Amino acid sequence: MAEDTVHPGKEPPAEARALAEQVERDGGRVLAVYQEPVGGHWQIFCLLPRQKVEASPFQRDLSPTHVKRLAEGVKRLDRFIDPIVLVSPRPGEYWTPNGNHRRAVLDRLKADSVPAILVTEPDVKYDVLALNIEKAHNLKERSLEVIRMYRSLVEEQPQTTEEDWSFQLESAHFITLGLLYERNKRFAGGAFAPILRRVDRFLKLRLPKGLPEREERAELVRATDEALGVVVAKLKKRGINHPYVKTFVLARATPLTKARKTLPPFDQTFRKLRDGIEGFDVSKVRYEDIQRSAIMAAPAPQE
């Protein structure tokens, strides 16, 4: 490793030197081994053969529209200026927890190499939600990334709990929603998210035992959604068809009130919610009620 790649006055630790040597063996080129300015962590700025770089297996799905827009921008500039963040989970493998759309652009343009910042700590591969800000996540994307991370952690870190990974998983309700979106990509997660956010908490169980508990929670939500579908169908027969209708029914059937400080357990909440939905009187609902509620719930315009 050339001296001019080393941070002045400091010798990189053994793991950084070994990783730099691995890059060279894999046909890449090390441009710098340095300490980033916030936490002083050692990183490698390098060029890697494009074929060596892959998306992490729990990365969100690519947006073809976003890839197309990025590719057009890169072609217009006639240059690629944003390095991709990589980790190496195993020798010879390079995953991107941040930059998968940019990686896809380089694939599309048949670039020979990928400019990358290679992080020496492999566990950064789980920091997808914190790092991946090039395209805003919607609820489905965040939830699917979280459940993919969760399944990987069950295999790689079976002695840990959800609480140990609370930063990477971000919010407990993303785990439950991820299981629901895996089953049904069109699941109405946005309607259930406000309730889930209040009663879903990180489990203290070790991850292999936590996953079955999560499946049970997802099943409770799924059963509630089935009951909700019956009510929505009845409202449609009455000529009431509005995009806010599921949220409207949930808001009126929920056992949770804004003033309630002590929240019931998850299971109890969704059993009571399902009972409330099954007993919902559709004859008392008017289209104007749903429309008015939708207007009141709409977020204020961004300044």
Image (cartoon, rainbow, N blue to C red):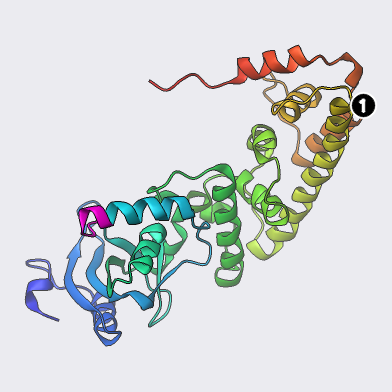
In the rendered image, which residue does mark 1 sit on? 279
**Image height of 228 relative to 205, above or below:** above
Residue placed most toward the observer, 157 or 182? 182
The quarter of the rendered structure image containing the C terminus is top left
Please report the residue visible at 54 percent of the width from the left and 48 percent of the height from the top.
Answer: 142
> Can residue 131 be seen here?
no
Task: Give the extent of the magenta segment.
Answer: 75-81
Vertical side of 143 occupied by 111: above or below: below
Residue in the image at 33% along x and 71% along y: 110
Q: The disc labelled 1 sits on which kind of residue?
A: Gly
The N terminus lies in quadrant: bottom left
Query: For numbered disc 1, what is the local secondary structure?
Result: loop
Q: Place residue 83 in its image quadrant.
A: bottom left
Residue 138 appears left or right of 204? left
How many residues crowd around disc 1 within 10 Å: few (fewer than 14), some, or many (20 or more)?
few
Which x, y percent locates residue 252? 78, 21
